[in-house]
Amino acid sequence: MVWRKLPPLEIEKRSFEIISRELAQTAIPAEQLPVLKRVIHTTADYDYVNNLYFSKGAVKAGLDALLSGAHIVTDTRMAQAGINQKALGRLGGSLHCFMADSDVAAAAKKRGITRAAVSMEKACTLNYSLLIAVGNAPTALLRLSELLEAGHIAPSLIIGVPVGFVNVVESKEIIKKAGFPCIIAEGRKGGSTVAAAICNALLYEAVNQI
């Protein structure tokens, strides 16, 4: 096997060239393609061609919100670390993760619920257009669905890609039926890296429009 050292940007460029070539015969809506390519680049998993669900107009809703200075709320520090905050800042937005906040930890312990659920409640206090990106905790999506129904929050886009086995599939299906723009990883797959990849794909597309 022959290999040679390549600079990081060249590695990424070639990776996307491979992905584009291997997707060439697959019918994918043009607006969804940058998101799907970046998720595949992150995971090396082509199953996302079939299990990444986009509600009607989801990509446009996310781009419009970001171009108007929307903020992003995520459920994990890992996703927070993976989202390009410089690109988000260029668009006028900020990134929020409340999982390590002392008030969130105290409320979760007192009520016997997860920090992720309380984090969604804290997101309701933000007076911005929001993208909610959940990559780990189905409890975040379940609490978010209750807050949506109660009218306490109305995100411009929900990215629901928690990974796992317990309440994961169910939480995603509930969000799909909530009537808000969403991008969902159907089934058990997903993760914080997938949430960050989707956010970054949208961010790079938005930055290219300014």
Image (spheres, rainbow, N blue to C red):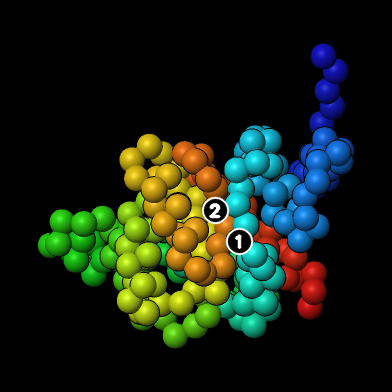
Q: Quadrant of residue 117?
A: bottom left
Evaluate if marks 2 and 1 touch, with contact meaning CB atoms under 8 Å apart: yes
Which residue is at 80% across, 46% downward? 27
Q: Nearer the viewer, residue 10 or 37?
A: 37
Other residues around mark 2 within 10 Å, as few (<14) / some (14–19) / many (≥20) = many
Element assignment for label 2: strand
Tell me the amino acid under the disc marked 2: Ile
Residue 83 at least partly seen? no
The residue pinned by badge 1 equals: 55
Residue 184 got which mark? 2
Residue depicted at x 41% and y 57%: 174
Of the two numbered discs 2 and 1 in the rendering, the one whose residue sits closer to the viewer: 1
108 with respect to 154 (left or right): left
Residue 39: give x, y in percent of width and height. Answer: 65, 46
- Residue furthest to the bottom in view is 127
Which residue is depicted at the point 32% across and 67% down? 146
Q: What amino acid is at disc 1?
A: Ser
Q: Residue at x 64, y 36 (%)?
A: 47
Q: Position of residue 18 (x, y in %)?
A: 83, 37
Q: Is 166 located above or below residue 69 in the figure?
A: above
User: Which quadrant of the rendered structure holds the C terminus?
Assistant: bottom right
Instruction: Say which quarter of the image contains residue 82.
Output: bottom right
Indicate the quadrant where residue 124 lies: bottom left
Total numbered labels placed on residues in the image: 2
Q: Name the quarter where the N terminus is drawn.
A: top right
Farthest residue to the left: give it: 110
In this image, 99 relative to 112: left or right?
A: right
Q: Is residue 3 left or right of residue 115?
A: right
Q: Position of residue 147 (x, y in %)?
A: 34, 71
